[in-house]
Image (tube, rainbow, N blue to C red):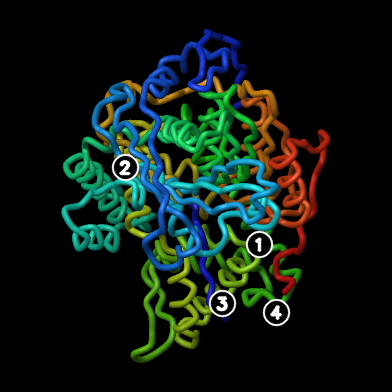
Amino acid sequence: MDRWKIAVFGVLVVSVPALAGCDASPSGQAYQQPSASAELVAQADAAPTPRLEWGPCDGPGLAGYQCAVANVPLDYAQPNGPTLPLAVLRQAATDPARRVGTLFTAVGGPGGSAFDSARDGELVPGELSRRFDVVTFDQRGIGRSSQVRCFANTDEQQRFWLNSWQPPANAEQERAAERGSRELAAGCAANDGALIAHLTTVDAARDLDLLRRAVGEPKLTYRGGSYASYLGEVYGALFGARVRALQLGAMIDPEAYTNDSSTDIANTAVGTEQVLDEFFRLCTQAGQPRCAFAGEDVRARDRALLDRLRQGAIVVGQGERAVSVSYGEVVQAHAIMLYDAQHGWPALAGLLAELERGADGNADTVREVLAAAPFSFDFLDSFTAITCADGTFGRNPEQWPVTGREFAGTAPTYAEFWLYLRQPCAVWPTPEQGYPQRYTGPWTLRSDVPALLLNNRFDPVTPLTSAKRAQQEMGNARLVVIDDGYGHDPSGDCARRLVEHYLIDLRLPDAGTSCRADRAPFTE
């Protein structure tokens, strides 16, 4: 098996009233602002524009980029108060004579580091890299931008996450998960309490507007997927008249994500379950050797494996090379490998086949697959802090097992996985009404150019239903569906051409346009 790595950057329709006030942007443009956002915008406008001094980047794999630090307000309610250093990275346009401007991007999660992502190659490919300077940044609380610290040291962090029961397999592990959620929330408050109060996506959106000002762009051109689509939605709701173009993909439903997190989690779990059905269908259709788990009753065999794992670990292989695999490890891999239909799906099939073989299985294959799926510990800290700052959660962690069993009625494989990732939010040290800067809608995009939204029909994390709701809530947006698209990244030649025409020339595809994927799973 070739070595591979999963990148996790790594889901109610509402009538939105047209309440508006009036203010002006730093570039002098007059426009309307919904009253709920006017103060948030005014605070950002009062902050000094950061000074970016570009220089060589420090770190392996970053030699082709330029880096700078932008000092932004820690608390936008004190725009001239203490600052937070944001790590910023730039990829210069390779055809400067035809340069359009600056394209901003961000990494998903929340918790993914833009610097880590940049090490994999170009920030954006092809014509976009020729026509734009591409700027990205580690969002506040992530990576080089004041990484959240929830533990006294890295050894303590490692011990916590390695012993975390995510998701729990039985009542004893449910109790351990509850204790762990309280420990994590208390640790974040004790070790980084001043920072975690300022990690909402509203804070990140205002940072993005300051970066726009810092590079001298009168309007923002932005591309982001997964959680980064939510950052674009928040920016558009707050700063709509400063938008040149928003190209968002793998769409989050902003209303559910912010104001009804329980429904959002349930929708994600159902979407993952539906994609699992496609995994089984296409695996069976492809047969072996293209799908290592192909055969009779693949879903029933998968369910039998998970039921066995709930009773205890499965040992694959024999002797010193044998590996013991837990329920939590397999469920996590089960979900994360569905992100990538080309590489992750065959790897998931291989993992399930080796688990089924048990002592006769290949332990090295299992190790390789499991090593590709886990989140980093810093990612988990940042994911928790930002998610808890943005969402709406019940304040009773003891309720999680009951809710998990309720959700399992429609998503038996994934309900508890997606739910328990958020259990610390039930005891997060937020004010009773949430952080004062948190934005709760409306999500209308008031810009001259509609946003371009892309979504795979079979996305395991941000289902197509969420993309349709996001389009309705934004209003000024056009959705293109990759009809036979599988996985979390809506890509391919058709999508690439549409994105290039939109970002470069501001040409929207016709309403109702759809794309076809370049290839199907299990065909290579």
The residue under label 4 is 288
Foreground label between 1 and 2: 2
Expressed as whole percent of the image width and height from the top left, the position of residue 138 reads 41, 48
Q: Nearer the viewer, mark 2 or mark 4?
A: 2
Give the crowd class for mark 4: few <14, some 14-19, many >=20 residues within 10 Å: few
Q: Position of residue 393 (x, y in %)?
A: 38, 32
Q: Relative to 147, is 335 above or below?
A: below
Q: CA distance from mark 2 to mark 4?
A: 52 Å
Tell me which residue sits at (42%, 40%) in the image: 403
Going from N to C along the chain, the mark reached first, 2 or 4, is 2
Comes first in the chain, label 1 or label 3: 1
Quadrant of residue 161 within the rendered picture: bottom left
Dot 4: element: loop
Please, what is the three-letter code of the amino acid marked with disc 2? Answer: Pro
Residue type at numbered disc 3: Ala
Q: Earlier in the sequence, mark 1 or mark 2?
A: 2
Query: What is the spatial separation of the Cα atoms under label 3 and label 2, in whole angstroms?
Result: 47 Å
Asked which quadrant contains residue 289, the reply is bottom right
- At label 4, the amino acid type is Gln
Q: Secondary structure at mark 1?
A: helix
Residue pointed to by mark 2? 85
Residue 446: where, in percent of width, then height? 62, 21
The residue carrying pointer 1 sits among few (fewer than 14), some (14 to 19) or many (20 or more) residues within 10 Å by Cα, namely many
Give the image quarter of residue 207: top left
Q: Is residue 308 above or below residue 199?
A: below
Q: Locate residue 447, reporting x and y percent.
A: 64, 23
Measure the alpha-carbon separation of dots 1 and 3. 14 Å
Residue matched to label 3 = 353
Q: Which residue is mark 1?
A: 279
